[in-house]
Amino acid sequence: MAPLHAAARPAPLPVSFVARLLRRAGWFVRDRWPNRSVEREVGGVRMAMPWSHRLPDYMRLDPAYGANLLDLAAGLSGGNEIAMIDVGANIGDSTLLLLDRVPGKVLAVEPDEVFLPFLRRNVVDNPAVVVEPSVLTVEERSDKFETARIGGTATLRESTDGTGLPTITVSELRRRHPDFADVRLVKSDTDGYDVTLVPAIASVWADSTPVLFFEYDHRASEAAGSDPMKVWDALATQGYAECAVWDNGGHPLFRASLDDTRARAARERPGSTASFWDVAAVHASDVAAIAVIDGLVPKS
């Protein structure tokens, strides 16, 4: 299926004060029993999730939410099978929606002890999905991680009881999963760790020059101990040169060179002074992918 240009999507539904109040009240109730298992249809795909998960609410209110990733994958695929990596796979929602739209296979990386059982349940009968139940790191780490959750997301933090989630380095991820040697698209959503993980993934999979779709958030990156601005130089060193950028709701913001994107990131500090960004970074040699992002977010 060809990607649907974002301009053709229905506009977000207007939300009244009363509707916002009712939604917040619903979240308050659901957060009292956050991990109760429910099934919801999201984007036409049935999936299990914790009752507190916000995804169905976001997608019901705004048809553009999350569609940028699906449109990007469809454009890169062109109807052919592609290999994808989903870092921060959560309950498997992106993985399921991608495979409903695009032929191929997904390596889903998710360590969280609450989301992981839902991910496994959602993909148990799908041979196109391989689950890696580990925290992805750039290098070997001696410190331990646990997760803190709110709604539909989880954030890593240092373990408070001496135990920790299993970890795997980016290099070991490739060695452990040789069927994913040729990756076309990487999606990373790790609440602040993306700016260090994405360049490492680009380096380890340099022979594939995958398109890198990641969350760019100054506040979350700094909270995770990273300088978000370093990602741009790191990607430039790997040969990445073009970007398409959306807001955190999936609405197009701009299409620019990586240098111009870096300059705008320095001015706007997304996540601190404005909503965070979804960024698709494309290698200078990837003519086909450049054409895809040009079609999704035309240069102004």
Image (cartoon, rainbow, N blue to C red):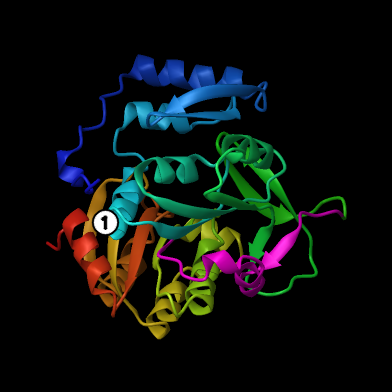
**In the rendered image, which quarter contains the C terminus?**
bottom left
| Residue 247 shows in this picture | no
Q: Is residue 204 above or below residue 77?
A: below
The residue tagged 1 is 78
Q: Specify start and end residues of the magenta stretch as a single range.
A: 163-185
Q: Does the segment drawn in magenta span residue 62?
A: no
Q: Identify residue type, mark 1.
A: Gly
Q: Is residue 14 above or below residue 168?
A: above
At a point 62% along the width and 25% down the height, the residue shown is 31
Estimate the x, y position of residue 207 in percent, counting from the top left. Answer: 45, 80
At a point 56% along the width and 65% down the height, the residue shown is 179
| Kind of element beneath mark 1 | loop
Quadrant of res 177: bottom right
**In the rendered image, which quarter contains the N terminus?**
top left
Q: Hey, which residue is sitting farthest left in the picture?
A: 300
At a point 49% along the width and 74% down the height, the residue shown is 199
Q: Residues within 10 Å of mark 1 (few under 14, many from 20)?
A: some
Q: Looking at this view, is 22 or 73 the one in front?
A: 73
At a point 57% along the width and 40% down the height, the residue shown is 123
Estimate the x, y position of residue 18 in percent, counting from the top left. Answer: 37, 14
Q: Is residue 55 left or right of residue 236?
A: right
Q: Does the segment drawn in magenta span residue 171?
A: yes
Estimate the x, y position of residue 117 in percent, counting from the top left. Answer: 68, 38
| Residue 147 shows in this picture | yes
Q: Hey, which residue is sitting farthest right in the picture?
A: 162
Q: Looking at this view, is 119 or 244 the one in front?
A: 119
Q: Is residue 90 above or below residue 176?
A: above
Estimate the x, y position of residue 124 in percent, counting from the top left. Answer: 62, 39
Total label count? 1
Q: Is residue 162 left or right of residue 222?
A: right
Quadrant of res 260: bottom left
